[in-house]
Structures are given as C-alpha cells and as structure tokens.
Amino acid sequence: MKTNHLQPYWKIHDPLDPPPPDASYLPTQEQIDRVLAPHQTHRERNLSLLIALDLSMPVWIRTCYARDLQDAWEKTLENAAELEEVDDVLLLDDEGLYSGYGEEWAKILLRLPLLPDAVPYTREDPNLDEGEYYGKPPDDERFMPMYEAARRSKQVVYLIDEEALRNNVVKILYLDIHGHAVWHNTIAPESIWEFEANYHRGGALSRAVLEHLDEHLLQPGEQLEYGG
C-alpha cells in the first residue's frame, strides 16, 4: 500500500508559510481531542483536503467488520491492492467509526461533508456541471439516464459492506453533491485496476460520455466485466 505524510490537523489548505507549531492561535491537543476529533478525526480531515484537491480519486469505505467475513475483506484488499490500487490514505477502515451503519452508510458523510461537496458551484444549478463538458445529450435514448447521472456525479466511492463481502465484489457508487448515489455498479476486486485504467481513476460516468458511452455501464446495478 502507498503511504502519504499526514498533515497537521489545522492545515485546511496548503499555505505557503504554515504557522509554527507553537503558534498561540492553533488549537491545543486537548482542544483537538475534546472538540474536533469526535466529529472528524485527523485522518478524515486530511482525506477531505486530498479529495478537495483531486476529485478523480475514489474513496474506499469499509462498513462491515463481521468476524466471519474478515478473510473475505483481506482477500478483497489483497486482490485490489495487487497493482497498488488501494491507497492507504484513501481507505476509511475503522471499526469504531464505520461499523453498524448497514444500509445507512451515507451517514458517514456527516463526518466528511467535503467528500461529495468538494467542487465549486456552477453559475446556475449547483447539482450540475457545465453542460459543454459532457457534450450534447446522446442520440441513443438508452444512455440518457447515465448521461444525466454523469452530469450530477461529483465523487466516486468504493463501498465494502456485508453484501459486497459475501458476493466478493466492490460496490461503485457515484455521489451527487448532496451525497446521494445517482448511479451504481459492482465489480470484482481484481478488475478494479483495468476499470480505473479505462476511466481515469474511476471517473467512469463522465469518461464514458466523453468516449461515446460504454455499454459496460448502461444499466445501474450491473456488475462490470473486464478481461478474458
């Protein structure tokens, strides 16, 4: 796995001249532990910063920690990480924080509101990107739902819940600016590297539209197939 340097808790952006660590206006460790950490950990804060700087990186979220599925989780990670597809900084894996959500996994976004909302608002509708980025609507009506979802999609999440582990898949969720999934597919962990190679680290919906659409993604909920 890749490892990146953790930045200080106070570092919301990338200042040219960061304050000295003993600056009087910085929160103390006691204040961080008491006020900040219960709502957002150091790791979550750094991840929010990273996502705000580069929206092309899918975030892995694990919500199932059942003991009988631990081997399935380790196998998923092993298969997906074979070509370093799982960046440790992009992985939310903490039983104390993320277990027990079940189908309400989106409540995790209350801890990371910048995950879906890390994009500048457009001049008109904040739910939509600039129309010209996606070109004209497709002539084939079958692709219209995907086209509309691509315009609303802001962030990609790889969700590992109980259902995903039992079926040996990764759930791909495309979130709009409010954190709602506007499109979803599944994929075998070992196929993620090819999926990301085709679609620029998982920005598949917009790339599919730009590349004249891909029938792999035609139906929401379908499992994507790659390779032989």
Image: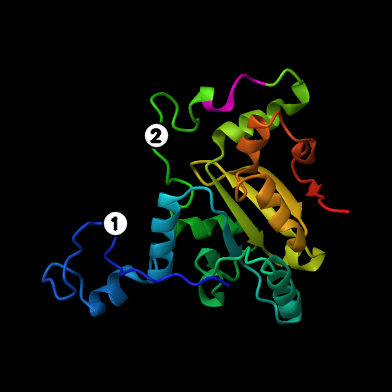
The structure residue drawn at horizontal position 24% and vertical position 74%, both measured from the top left corner, is 31
Left or right: residue 103 compared with residue 222: left
Residue sitting nearer the eye, 33 or 168:
168
**Residue 67 visible in the current orientation:** yes
Q: Which residue is mark 2?
A: 121
Above or below residue 162? Residue 174 is above
Image coordinates for residue 48, horizontal then vertical, percent: 42, 57
* Residue 187 is inside the magenta segment: no
**Secondary structure beneath disc 1?**
loop
* Residue 28 in which image quadrant: bottom left
**Amino acid at circle 2:** Tyr
Q: Which residue is mark 1?
A: 14
* Mark nearer the N terminus (1 vs 2): 1
Quadrant for the N terminus, please: bottom right
- In magenta, the rendered stretch is 133-137
Q: Main secondary structure of the magenta part?
A: loop
The structure residue drawn at horizontal position 49% and vertical position 30%, both measured from the top left corner, is 129
Name the mark on residue 82: none
* Residue 94 in which image quadrant: bottom right
Report crowding for label 2: few under 14, some 14 to 19, many 20 or more residues within 10 A (C-alpha): some
